[in-house]
Image (cartoon, helix red, strand yellow):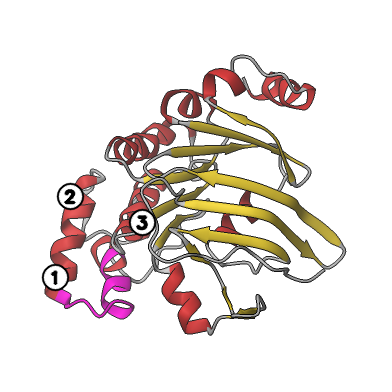
Amino acid sequence: MSTTQVPPSGTTPTAQEPMVRARGVHKVFGHTHVLKGVDLEVARGSVTVVLGPSGSGKSTLLRCINELEQITAGSIHVDGELMGYRLDAKGVLHRLHPKVIARQRSRIGMVFQRFHLFPHLTALQNVMEAPVQVRGLSRAAARERALELLSRVGLADRVDHYPAQLSGGQQQRVAIARALAMDPELMLFDEPTSALDPELVGEVLAVMRDLARDGMTMVVVTHEIGFAREVADHVVFMDDGVIVAEGPPSEVLDNPAEPRLQEFLSHVL
């Protein structure tokens, strides 16, 4: 399967244009067809929660949005920009240079299940690293911004602690601050609480609620149904590489029509 022609990305995105627009997205790993023609729109300033059983393609979809995985077919636009490719005058797609893709990726924050913090750096240094190394920010400016972000996620008293000195919830909050340090237009969360002890989940969800209140566009893969019901503007249910159901939480979670969704919710609620 090869990547096919996509609509032109246009020029300047409008306020009405979605932050994320995926069209006919396929992803194949060897003989495994993980995404099977996914269409998705994420409105600006909204929170989209993606639910589904293990192996349904949820995390792969996030990684494709962020260009951590190259799609096999279809197209993904973020903020009106075609991700990973340019379209020439004849409608032929050309893969972008890795440096250009890295620039596209820098506009998107991503928080993973595992925290992926640098163990030899303090919380403050972890948050400062990318703005200094990638964006060329001065260390003084990066430090000021990092202190502000660590305070925002409730870790002002842990800035000089190394990851091994922090709880799992604290490490995940450092990871969120690190992603925010790049001033992203979009935040992706890949099951950010699944590796945490139950008593630590709430502190991470609280930070995410705060981001939602501030209007950050977010796509969240999670099994936290309570969070989806409370915070999401749009809920997507995936199964076997396709979107089976989507809509507002009241419709998808409280009045599910699809039998597969009903079965899933019966196991997680």
Magenta residue span? 127-139
- Residue 136 lies in the magenta-colored region: yes
Looking at the image, the residue that sits furthest to the top is: 255
Residue on which the image places disc 3: 185
Quarter of the figure with residue 179: bottom left
> Could you tell me which quadrant the N terminus lies in?
bottom right
Residue 69, how many percent across, how many down? 63, 67
Judging by the rendered image, the residue that carries numbered circle 1 is: 141
Q: Residues within 10 Å of mark 2 (few under 14, many from 20)?
A: some
Residue identifier under label 2: 156
Residue 83 lies in the magenta stretch = no
Q: Residue at x 65, y 47 (%)?
A: 39
Report the mark closest to the observer, 1 or 2: 1
Q: Is residue 229 left or right of residue 154?
A: right
Mark 2 or mark 1, which is nearer the start of the sequence?
Answer: 1
- Residue at 70% from the left image edge and 23% from the top image edge: 267
Indicate which disc, 1 or 3, sits on the residue closer to the N terminus: 1
